[in-house]
Image: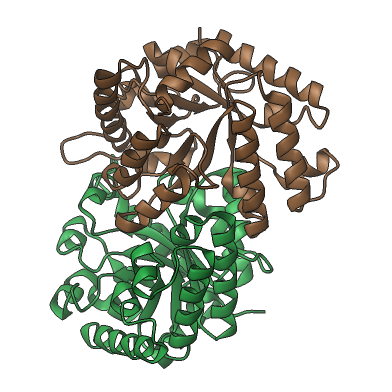
Chain colours: A brown, B green
Amino acid sequence: MTPAFGARLAAAMADLGPLCVGIDPHASLLAAWGLPDDPEGLRRFALTTVEAVAGAVPAIKPQAAFFERHGSAGVAVLEETIAAGRAAGLLVVVDAKRGDIGSTMDAYADAFLRDGSPLAGDAVTLSPYLGFGSLSPAVRLAGRTGRGLFVLALTSNPEGAAVQHARAADGTPVAVSVARAAAALNATEIRLTGAPLGSVGLVVGATVGDAAARLGLDLAAVRGPLLAPGVGAQGAGAAELEAVFGDARAAVLAASSRGVLTAGPDPAALRAAALRARDEAAVALR
Amino acid sequence: MTPAFGARLAAAMADLGPLCVGIDPHASLLAAWGLPDDPEGLRRFALTTVEAVAGAVPAIKPQAAFFERHGSAGVAVLEETIAAGRAAGLLVVVDAKRGDIGSTMDAYADAFLRDGSPLAGDAVTLSPYLGFGSLSPAVRLAGRTGRGLFVLALTSNPEGAAVQHARAADGTPVAVSVARAAAALNATEIRLTGAPLGSVGLVVGATVGDAAARLGLDLAAVRGPLLAPGVGAQGAGAAELEAVFGDARAAVLAASSRGVLTAGPDPAALRAAALRARDEAAVALR
């Protein structure tokens, strides 16, 4: 049986540091790499990136939207990217931000978390507007197949506050109730398996500033991986990361895409940029 | 130039009534139709449904999750279903519940709302966990291409309340702020075009009961289409629909899937079930 995602990610981060390279084949990046904005350009972009960063970082995160722009042919490239990443020993987080209810959520779980599904990587991102509880088919299937989830919790875009900072009748902010639901699942998993990290992660922007503290978001209690855009370089430095993540810094998987991808198309330059971003993230998160 | 989605939908509903047939090819429905749970089974299911209901109802709503279960081959069937629906004169709402920020949201807009994209129907469903404002690339592109949006607002699954009923610091519930943002966009569109209905719709569960009133959700002010699962049959009757939608009942597009699809695979039986569901919805919404 495949070990659980949290345990696999913790081991990979101990080996290779805290970076997840986002594979975001924007039209502008394709052009900068001299590639056409079509499925074949997408394919060369994604596979070049996979090959360049394998062994340098623990994880990649292909962004579904940039593949769906090219329709089913683009989705076929996403499948190929997932397979190539896994074959190269990378953990693959499919950034799809899916979320629905009932049998529809079952179907999304099936698509992104079932053994043998061509769209299943090692983890998938989910969106909880329909309530964290509506995601339970994904929680269950991920548990059975050793896969992981990253549920949107608190993001740094200004529009997010209207939803994520809103409070339930008992005063609990939405982002906090998402984090508590993940914490409860991870506590059970950790109790049963002794894993260092549970498999229900969150997406938390590194540049949310004092919002985490103001809302009372206790990320150390989550005990799951925290996928964080905005670490290092133009993003959050050590002090801000300490303020947002506190003792959960060791669980942060920094997501970086442009910072790495603009170094391409030369594979050696891509790999060097990934190593640099990884080491910068490690220092900032120390 | 294509007229705006709101205007096209209002005209189609005036002709054919308030029903949108959900195309949800569950494994169990495929089995009940004697079809294999593979892309070819999916294809026969979806195309049979399109052909059977064309001319009987104004719209169909293929649910992306059931196609993504079959990977890129399933997504190719979704593309074929969208094309067949539009060719048959149906309005096609792609139920994908996408939502992201920045250039990723641009890419989703491109996938589902751009002329010539194989995944673009007439409208797409979106999820606003990252804030309604984060969806603006879709609002802009939909405006330019005469397409529409249905943004998740208030749903009837019990887990949804934890997010949708939560209140901002000024006391506004999340579902209400989503509705107000849609209302503002529709007011502008209606002022500029004189259309009877704007193109920024909402998803509102017909069986939310008194939640709409308790939260102060003013659906009549939205002036956009309201995609509503749970109208009629086992769902909400006339009294409950009046309580939830009030004067916005004329803007309700009832979504029905199982109630119609279980009548298949015989096309005549499917069409009869769609007509019956349509007429029941029309009576209940009167």
Q: Quadrant of the N terminus of chain A?
A: top left
Does residue B165 appear left or right of residue B111 in this picture?
Answer: left
**Left or right of B143 in this view: B215:** left
Q: What's the residue at 28%, 25% (across, down)?
A: A189
Q: Residue at (46%, 42%) from the top-left corner?
A: A115
Question: Can you give x and y, in whole percent of width and height, for residue B42 in the image?
Answer: 48, 68
Asked whether B10 or A263 is in front, the reply is: A263
Q: Nearer the viewer, residue B275 or A15?
A: A15
Can see residue A264?
A: yes
The outermost residue toward the right is: A34
Query: Hey, which quadrant is residue A26 in on the image?
Result: top right
Number of marks present in the image shown: 0
Across and down, in percent, residue B116 comes to: 69, 68
- The answer to whether residue B197 is visible is no
B266 up-or-down from B96: above or below: below
Query: Which quarter of the figure has residue A43?
Result: top right
What percent of the width, then of the height, locates residue B181?
41, 57
Percent of width and height locating residue B6: 48, 76
Residue A70, above or below B166: below
Q: Is residue A251 left or right of residue A77?
A: left
User: Which residue is drawn at the image coordinates 63% and 58% (left, top)?
Assistant: A72
